[in-house]
Amino acid sequence: MIKIALLLFIVLTVNAYLTWFERKVVALMQSRVGPHRVGPHGLLQPAADGLKFLFKEDVMPGGVDKFVYLLAPFLALTLALASLAVIPFGPNPLPFKFFGHQIDLWITNPDIGLLVLFSITALGVYGVALAGWASNSKYPLLGGLRSSAQMVSYELSMTMSVVGVLLMANSFSLTDIISRQDSSRWGLLSWNIFTLHGGFPQIVGFLCFFISAIAETNRVPFDLPEAESELVAGFHTEYSSFKFAMFFIAEYTSMITVSSLCAILFFGGWNSPFPATPFWQFAHYIPSLILIPFGLWIIYDGVKYETIFGKLILPGIGTAITALGAVLIIFPAVNEYIQGPFWLLSKIFFFLFFYVWARGTLPRLRYDQLMNIGWKLLLPVSIANVIITAGFVLFRGAP
Amino acid sequence: MNPALIVFFVLAALSVIGALSLILQKHPIHSALSLIVVMVSLAGLYLSMGAEFVAAVQIIVYGGAIMVLFVFVIMLLNAGEEEHTDFSKLAKFGGLPLALALTGLLAAAMIHHAGSVPNPANPDALASTSSISMMLFSTFVYPFELTSFLILIAIMGALVLAQREKT
């Protein structure tokens, strides 16, 4: 229970700062400053946005189907958050007992973890489709129709593209899939995307999966359900106040889920990219090597910041980050312990950055292009990937 | 009363209520939503029997793909509320006795064979995905392949119908 509450709190905070991160990165890509008025570097912008969502008037348009209209955002948000329950964040349980319980770094770890995720994704369409239908308005209806067609089409190629990984791991359990990519000997060459051991490199599978997953989460360049130039705001046009925020949080949460799935299925999960030989021992200090300079840079940046508030708060944050890095060097046991979560979180962060990157660079697809890519490119390619991988697994003997 | 039994009764009640609401709702979307409730609670029942794979597939295929198509078609046709009509003569006079007879028959069969029904809590029967696939591709390979032929024929039939309308 405590774990669920804690994970919810962390994910919702990360969601809020993901919006800040996205706006900052897109702004840098377009030579703008991005949010910078609320707090130093706009760091309090997410809090301001959240408060604004809470205090805005909650408008319910006339003629809506009240039950379905209210159900849709709840469905979208709960399903998006529920999918986080099966994602494992680290290999070892917490090193100390908590009220006499061993605490694992996941909420639940069913044998069919991946199938649970896919069944939650399969139901996730309803939030968007029903929102579009229940709003009793043209643009949301079009957005809802588009999204249900798009999500049904891309779900096929998304599911097919992971079959290769499943064949190689011989299991649906996410922890089994990760432990199969154990990198202690060959480093990142044993990740599913590169490995030749007992299978076939899943690079094609990964590309199919990631493209379909972006389409499943309705993000640019597949954000046709909410194409603002044609459909105002698509399926959530008629939603205001916190009901709109619920769709927003759902979208960002599913971004996190997809990023962690990419990291787990294809990029070795919590396995480090370096082998566990003595030569590569220094790789264990990479978390500190990143944290300490980053913290020092924040202190330096904070000292010369314009506002008094920024001068106080930024060096504070910087000191905390530097201290964290120092703690990791001083206590090797702690450092060993955070290796797994550190690598998994870095990979997740990379894919989140990729989402933002794609948003900053790619134009939206046309609708017929979207359908063509889904049915005529991704689906056949992912099926071919399954057949080739199955052949290799058969040829080399099951793992 | 053990927890498994409570879970069973909650899910069973949910699926029955969902099925009733499917018939009684006036709007097609509400009926479709009720059907989704039925599908998901059935998946829960399968899960409580230890058939994890079947439960997940039930949600992915029925709850997800098929019901999304239903909702999609209802949205596309913009179907409005239906009007309740009187029962047809056949349903009025033949339906109720037949339904009662069927219920009686099923109940009698269940009571008669109560001992020989396999225990649903037996985890080895359907639990693992590999045992299901072994069964599908060895014992039940002909029914399995015949079913896929049936689906293929249905797809081809749909294509032919769609093409005929175009020309």
Image (cartoon, coloured by chain):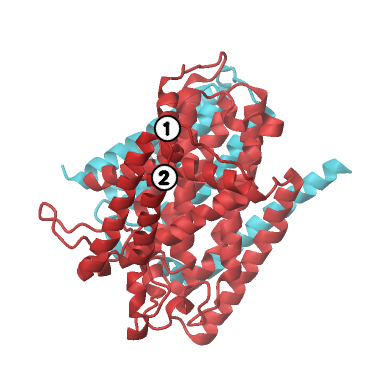
Chain colours: A red, B cyan
- CA neighbours of label 2 inside 10 A, class few (<14), some (14 to 19), many (20+): few
| Residue plotted at (67% across, 24% down) | A138
Occupied quadrant, residue B85? top right
Vertical comparison of B160 with A231: above or below: below
Residue at the limit of the structure toward the top, as seen here: A62
- Residue B18 circle label: 1
Tell me which amino acid carries mark 2.
Lys
Occupied quadrant, residue A26? top right
- Residue A304 circle label: 2
Closer to the camera in the image, B151 or A150: A150
Q: Secondary structure at mark 2?
A: loop
- Camera sees residue B18: yes
Residue B59: image location, x then y, percent: 46, 48
Q: Quadrant of the image for the N terminus of chain A? A: top left
- Camera sees residue B99: no
- CA neighbours of label 1 inside 10 A, class few (<14), some (14 to 19), many (20+): many
| Residue plotted at (26% across, 68% down) | A329
Residue A169: image location, x then y, percent: 43, 72
Residue at the limit of the structure toward the left, as seen here: A100
Chain under label 1?
Answer: B
Q: Quadrant of the image for the C terminus of chain A? A: bottom left
Residue A286: image location, x then y, percent: 37, 68
Occupied quadrant, residue A348? bottom left
Closer to the camera in the image, B17 or A187: A187
